[in-house]
Image: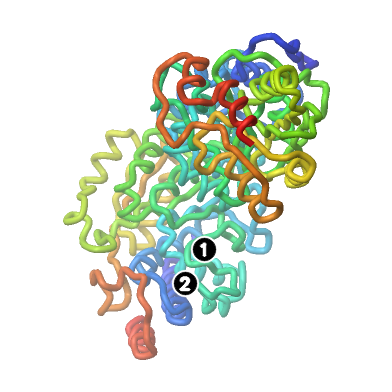
């Protein structure tokens, strides 16, 4: 694979498919990374890479704490460990190893975790990681990225390999429509303004970006409200310039994330604006609850992170 | 091989400087620093291939002090080796100085952060995997404390090291038998260590951790062992070398020493 193939906009693809594809593509371009797996390559989407590049996979079995701390030590040979597992295990179980052995030492380790948010679906609360953005963004030195779809994920993955230092990158599990064509530049720390609008701004991340775009369309058609939609895929560092502009140029901000409202992307935006440009805000996210089993769209409705909830939040501002 | 008498002299210097470091640093852990003096002397002055004037040399052997609280001894060994001036160790734990209370990656000669028990063996294992992956000859050493053997993370690493047949990895347990609040046997018994490690199919060597000749032979044995990681169970005495600290729990630390205690300690080390 000498050229990275992007999916067509509108195609329904999971981000984890993008993980497998971009791993194999990157393997043809550079020999300075390996995959660290904890017996879940089938779940994270890395399986195609494991099949095509077995010599570039180091297997740790179901022992994530060891995998994480080993990645810190491994990185000093100059090869980048791309550590991958489910977020509950990678972010939570091995959190201290990530914080101390990797981030405190500023190791060049990349953590790519799947099974994030209600997007995880039927596996239920154990696997639905709703707290990762909150815990990860509280750690110094780390870059936190939450791509909107498989195409943006692939761009983010390549940018991540070029970036020196620890990175946490979210991988979605469910099939969702492609919204990024892969042609626009991806830059770590740069938010993307997807639609212009002067009345209100919706700042969304991950699977919520597609919903935000649909809501903006509905608001225009039904309410004559012009909504600006911003894809905030880098949660840390925060694109303060773009957020400040939104606060200054529109009448309020709705944030939308498949994550607990406590400490997530909405909190990051609110913290920044409270100190720099107090703005009317509503945060759409899971309201400090654990998830449960269900299909992602059923869960979105049940936990009020669906399009109707974003729509209502916009009207309430 | 360096002469055991020279290495014993260096071990004594490590002890003297560890005590000065803790005194001037206003706090620190003397007991566990004193128990690893011979280990550090043999590792840095006989066994390991390192360059003090090029701390980040890619082909160097690596050392992880998993029991990071014993860093006064490690900093003293590094200073004696020439990584920085020996007077620097007196600035341990001073806000404006770089010798942190637990090992930090930017200190010359430090290969891994530590201080949170349980992560050291994994970090050394990662270094050993990195050497294998890049086809380099460097070796990874880790000094574990008794507390490390109670952390689940350590046992994950023990499992993984033999699975990956890491014969370039050597773990040395400073088995002094005392932990923070009581003896290991009282708090959470980890013994028998040797039998457990044998079941995990490591190459096991059980020695007196203050006997330099035994340490040298054990490390030689490790180098000659193929397809297996080596575990050296170094039986030691907490507080070794200062009679009133030996096997006395209250000297585990973190303690603040007064002038009299400093003088008594230095006098004891001369006996």
**Left or right of A185, for residue B271:** left
Q: Nearer the viewer, residue B242 or A195?
A: A195
Q: CA distance from mark 2 to mark 1?
A: 8 Å
- Front residue of B97 and B165: B97
- Quadrant location of the C terminus of chain A in the rendered image: top right
Residue at horizontal 51 percent and vertical 27 percent from the top: A117
Q: How is the image coloured?
A: rainbow
At horizontal 77% and vertical 17% (from top left) the residue drawn is: A4
The picture quadrant where one finds residue A47 is top right
Question: Mark 1, chain letter?
Answer: B
Q: Position of residue B233 (x, y in %)?
A: 32, 51
Quadrant location of residue B250?
Answer: bottom left
Quarter occupied by residue A161:
top right
Q: According to the image, label 2 marks what residue?
A: B10
The single residue placed furthest to the front in the displayed view is A223
Q: Inspect this view and state whether residue A26 appears.
A: no
Left or right: residue A297 compared with residue A66 = right
- The numbered disc on residue B45 is 1
The quadrant of the picture occupied by the N terminus of chain A is: top right
Q: Residue A224 location, x and y as percent?
A: 75, 23
Q: Where residue A109 appears, x then y in whole percent?
A: 60, 39
């Amino acid at each position: 694979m000498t050229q990275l193939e992007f999916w067509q906009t509108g195609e329904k693809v999971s981000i984890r498919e993008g993980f497998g594809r971009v791993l194999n593509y990157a393997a043809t371009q550079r020999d300075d990374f390996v995959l660290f797996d904890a017996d879940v390559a089938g779940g994270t989407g890395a399986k195609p890479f494991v099949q095509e590049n077995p010599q570039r996979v180091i297997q740790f079995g179901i022992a994530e704490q060891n995998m994480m701390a080993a990645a810190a030590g491994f990185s000093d040979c100059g090869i980048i460990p791309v550590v991958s597992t489910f977020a509950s295990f990678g972010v939570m179980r091995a959190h201290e190893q990530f914080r101390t052995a990797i981030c405190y030492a500023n190791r060049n380790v990349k953590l790519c975790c799947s099974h994030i948010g209600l997007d995880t679906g039927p596996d239920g609360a154990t696997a639905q990681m709703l707290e990762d953005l909150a815990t990860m963004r509280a750690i110094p030195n780390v870059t936190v990225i939450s791509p909107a779809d498989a195409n943006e994920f692939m761009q983010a993955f390549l940018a991540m390999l070029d970036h020196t230092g620890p990175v946490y990158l979210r991988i979605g599990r469910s099939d969702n429509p492609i919204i990024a064509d892969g042609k626009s530049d991806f830059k770590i720390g740069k938010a993307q303004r997807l639609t212009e609008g002067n009345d209100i701004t919706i700042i969304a991340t991950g699977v919520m970006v597609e919903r935000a775009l649909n809501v903006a369309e509905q608001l225009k058609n039904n309410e004559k409200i012009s909504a600006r939609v911003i894809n905030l895929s880098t949660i840390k560092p925060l694109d303060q310039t773009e957020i400040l502009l939104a606060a200054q140029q529109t009448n309020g901000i709705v944030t939308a994330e498949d994550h607990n409202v406590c400490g997530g992307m909405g909190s990051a935006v609110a913290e920044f604006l409270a100190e720099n440009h107090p703005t009317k805000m509503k945060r759409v996210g899971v309201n400090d609850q654990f998830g449960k089993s269900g299909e992602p769209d059923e869960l979105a409705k049940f936990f009020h992170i669906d399009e109707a909830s974003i729509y209502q939040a916009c009207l309430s501002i | 091989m360096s002469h055991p008498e020279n290495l014993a002299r260096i071990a004594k210097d490590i002890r003297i400087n560890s005590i000065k470091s803790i005194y001037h640093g206003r706090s620190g852990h003397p007991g566990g620093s004193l128990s690893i003096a011979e280990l550090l002397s043999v590792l840095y002055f006989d066994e390991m291939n390192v360059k003090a004037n090029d701390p980040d040399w890619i082909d160097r052997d690596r050392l992880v002090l998993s029991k990071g609280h014993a860093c006064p001894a490690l900093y003293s060994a590094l200073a004696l080796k020439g990584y920085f001036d020996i007077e620097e160790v007196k600035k341990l734990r001073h806000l404006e100085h770089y010798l942190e209370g637990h090992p930090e990656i930017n200190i010359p000669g430090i290969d891994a952060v530590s201080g949170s028990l349980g992560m050291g063996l994994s970090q050394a294992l990662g270094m050993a995997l990195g050497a294998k992956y890049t086809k380099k000859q460097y070796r990874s050493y880790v000094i574990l404390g008794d507390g490390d053997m109670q952390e689940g993370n350590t046992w994950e690493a023990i499992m993984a090291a033999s699975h990956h047949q890491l014969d370039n990895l050597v773990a040395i347990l400073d088995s002094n038998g005392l932990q923070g609040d009581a003896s290991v046997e009282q708090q959470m018994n980890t013994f028998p260590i040797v039998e457990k490690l044998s079941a995990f199919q490591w190459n096991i060597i059980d020695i007196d951790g203050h006997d330099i000749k035994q340490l040298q032979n054990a490390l030689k044995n490790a180098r000659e062992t193929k397809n297996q990681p080596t575990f050296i169970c170094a039986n030691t005495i907490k507080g070794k070398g200062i009679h009133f600290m030996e096997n006395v729990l209250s000297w585990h630390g973190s303690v603040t020493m007064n002038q009299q205690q400093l003088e008594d300690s230095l006098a004891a080390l001369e006996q």
